[in-house]
């Protein structure tokens, strides 16, 4: 079995982006609870608390914008998957805040993983 270099590159880019997003959100006062929560419905990149709200964050990282912005790559189907997984997570943790929301963080990285742009969109509507 050979490993696909493009697949390895994408997972590294995603991992780097999620770390950048988590640090960005911490600086804004979010308390990070989990990263990469997986359930049968899907996966949530970052789960955090912002004031009195449980926040589920979808992070999309790109190494350029030739195919559009990172945010444009998040489909309504993906947001529905995040919403289902978020409801499941909330049901497992009734002690956490009852207010729920989905945020999106879009990141464009340069050749040396430097952040060229970071866009945080709170409370994305389905």
Image (spheres, grey):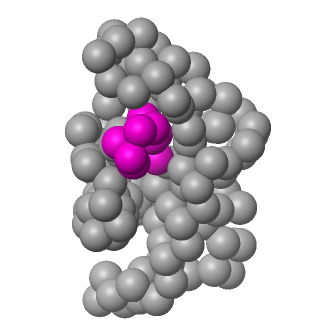
Quadrant housing residue 35: top left
Residue pictured at 25% horizontal, 38% vertical:
34
Residue 52, given in percent of the width and then of the height, sits at 41, 38
Dominant secondary structure (helix, strand or loop) of the stretch shown in magenta:
strand
Residue pictured at 62% horizontal, 48% vertical:
123
Residue 84, given in percent of the width and then of the height, sits at 57, 20
State which quarter of the image contains the C terminus: top right
Residue pictured at 66% horizontal, 72% vertical:
69
Residue 58 inside the magenta-drawn segment = no
Residue closest to the eye, 81 or 91: 91
Question: As displayed, is residue 111 above or below residue 18?
Answer: below
Q: What count of labels does the image hold?
A: 0
State which quarter of the image contains the N terminus: top left
Residue 6, given in percent of the width and then of the height, sits at 41, 62
Residue 13 in sight from this viewpoint: no
Direction from residue 64 to residue 110 in the image, left or right: left
Residue 122, given in percent of the width and then of the height, sits at 58, 55
Question: As displayed, is residue 43 above or below residue 85?
Answer: below
Q: Please report the bounds of the magenta region as a residue range.
A: 49-57
Residue pictured at 71% horizontal, 34% vertical:
77
Residue closest to the eye, 53 or 76: 53
Question: As displayed, is residue 70 above or below residue 84?
Answer: below
Residue closest to the eye, 30 or 40: 30
């Amino acid at each position: 079995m050979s490993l696909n270099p493009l697949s390895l590159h994408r997972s590294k880019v995603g991992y780097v982006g999620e770390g950048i997003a988590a640090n960005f959100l911490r600086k804004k006062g979010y308390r990070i609870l989990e990263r990469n929560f997986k359930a049968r419905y899907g996966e949530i990149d970052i789960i955090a608390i912002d004031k009195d709200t449980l926040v589920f964050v979808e992070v999309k990282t790109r190494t350029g914008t030739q195919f559009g912005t990172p945010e444009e790559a998040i489909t309504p189907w993906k947001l529905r998957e995040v919403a289902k997984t978020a409801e499941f997570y909330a049901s497992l943790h009734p002690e956490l805040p009852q207010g729920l929301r989905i945020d999106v963080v879009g990141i464009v990285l340069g050749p040396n993983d430097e952040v060229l742009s970071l866009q945080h969109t709170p409370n994305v509507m389905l």
